[in-house]
């Protein structure tokens, strides 16, 4: 079970004690307009960390994830843009030049990658892609947000594991 303590205003320590190792693992959450979760822990701890985070903020609202190191069973996470006309139009043409919600020159379309190409590259390095989920950008909210989408035609997020 995770123990949650507010150690400073809007700064929370999520502690998980593992008796088999006689170790306590600490994770930190900064509750802010752009919440930050620092250290996600071992894969087996994820449900405990997620449930503890949910007592403070909605886990889907985590904006930043920070790591000081990776655990031996950590996953490789990715968030990138698809190499499609829709992604070019939205992120570069509209985002950078028409609407200006992204700084000009921020994206290089040639570095965008299709999900199937990324999956193939990861497989060549011994990583198995486990999940890929499309993302959509909600520009009419304040602050602007990103949410899950039914397609990956603009951007996507996912993870891969060894194996």
Image (cartoon, grey):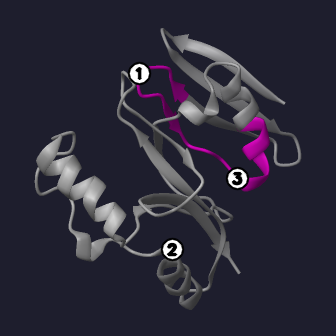
Q: Is residue 7 left or right of residue 49?
A: left
Tell me the residue that label 2 is attached to: 115
Residue at 41 percent across and 21 percent down: it is: 33
Residue 7: say if magenta.
Answer: no
Judge by depth and name the residue closer to the eye, 122 or 119.
119
Name the residue tied to disc 1.
33
For the point 55% across and 91% down, the residue is 124
Q: Which residue is mark 3?
A: 42
Residue 88 in picture, x, y percent from top left: 27, 64
Q: Residue 107: which quarter of the image?
A: bottom left
Residue 67 visible in the displayed image = no
Front position among marks 2 and 1: 2
Q: Is residue 81 left or right of residue 71?
A: left
Residue 22: image location, x then y, percent: 81, 42
Question: Of label 2 and label 3, which has the lower sequence position?
Answer: 3
- Kind of element beneath mark 2: helix
Around disc 2, counting alpha carbons within 10 Å, would you say few (fewer than 14), some (14 to 19), or many (20 or more)? many
Using the rendered view, name the quadrant where residue 101 is placed. top left
Q: Are marks 2 and 3 in contact (CB under 8 Å)?
A: no
């Amino acid at each position: 079970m995770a123990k949650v303590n507010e150690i400073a205003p809007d700064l929370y320590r999520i502690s998980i004690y593992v008796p088999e190792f006689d170790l306590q693992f600490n994770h930190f959450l900064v509750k802010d307009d752009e919440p930050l979760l620092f250290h996600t822990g071992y894969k087996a701890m994820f449900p405990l960390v997620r449930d503890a985070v949910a007592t403070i903020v909605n886990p889907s609202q985590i904006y930043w994830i920070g790591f000081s190191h990776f655990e031996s069973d950590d996953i490789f996470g990715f968030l990138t843009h698809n190499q499609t006309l829709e992604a070019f139009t939205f992120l570069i043409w509209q985002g950078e030049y028409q609407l200006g919600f992204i700084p000009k020159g921020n994206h290089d379309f040639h570095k965008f990658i299709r999900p199937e190409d990324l999956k193939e590259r990861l497989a060549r390095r011994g990583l198995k892609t486990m999940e890929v989920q499309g993302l959509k950008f909600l520009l009419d909210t304040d602050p602007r947000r990103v949410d899950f989408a039914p397609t990956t035609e603009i951007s996507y997020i996912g993870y891969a594991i060894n194996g």
